[in-house]
Amino acid sequence: MENIFENLILLLINFITNIGYFGIFIGMFLESTIVPIPSELIMIPAGFAASQGLMNLYLILLFGILGNVLGAIFSYYVAIYWGRPVIFKIGKYFFLNKKNVEKIENFFKLHGEISIFTARLIPGFRHFISLPAGIARMNIYKFSIYTFIGSSLWTTILTILGFYIGKNQNLINQYLELIIVAVLILCILLVFLYYWFNKGRTRK
């Protein structure tokens, strides 16, 4: 099993190296849409490739973050133009009526910043958080800024992880699990502090 994973890592490294930074950009762009491509499979091998002198670490981060942010903005605008009509058509089958959609919109207008930032750090949520933000027509500048901050942090963590221990799958698994737990705790703490200091807005 370990040999299979090592071979997979080598294939991914070769794939990313052959396509270059454009491959990283496309992969991270898709990761920010509803295409379920784990960023771990892109940035960790890329970081390892940098440690081997095959790629430049700073360019990896640049193209990875740029792809992530532009993919999120793409999803945001898709949700603006097609999200609401689709939700109103199919929402009734999932007990999602107009009133519920309006509640989501109001929530993002009031608490969009903390929602976007924390979601960019949580596995699973990263793929979909742009959609409710777009449906709610959250301020695009705020959306872009908090997407950039969250994406930069997560992309950097994965790249550095790959750079230093990319060849050791067992260590990657251990550190990745610890990092995810630590990030979740951080997000919970941030949300708690946010609500504590914004009690008035939260009541609305």
Image (cartoon, rainbow, N blue to C red):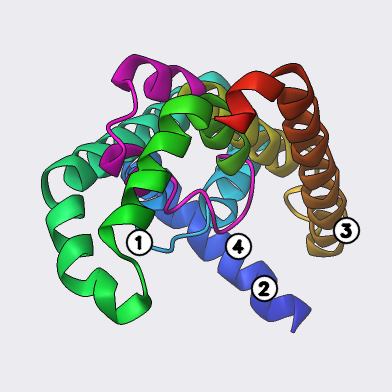
For mark 4, give the secondary structure.
helix
For mark 3, give the secondary structure.
helix
Mark pair 1, 4: CA separation: 21 Å
Q: Position of residue 99 (x, y in %)?
A: 33, 54
- Tell whether label 4 touches label 2 (CB within 8 Å): yes
- Tell whether label 3 touches label 4 (CB within 8 Å): no
Badge 2 is on which residue? Answer: 5
Pointer 1 or 4: first along the chain = 4
Mark 1 closeness class: few <14, some 14–19, many ≥20 residues within 10 Å = few
Badge 3 is on which residue? Answer: 174
Horizontal side of 67 relative to 149 (left or right) equals left
Q: Amino acid at mark 1?
A: Val
Viewer-closest of 174 and 188: 188
Pointer 2 or 1: first along the chain = 2
Q: Amino acid at mark 2?
A: Phe
Mark pair 2, 4: CA separation: 6 Å
- Give the residues in magenta: 120-146
Observer-side mark, 3 or 2, equals 3
Pointer 3 or 2: first along the chain = 2
Query: Tag on residue 35?
Result: 1
Badge 4 is on which residue? Answer: 9
Residue for point 77% across, 46% down: 184
Residue for point 28% across, 81% down: 93
Which of the 4 quarters of the picture holds residue 161?
top right
Q: Position of residue 34 (x, y in %)?
A: 35, 58
Residue for point 50% across, 48% down: 126
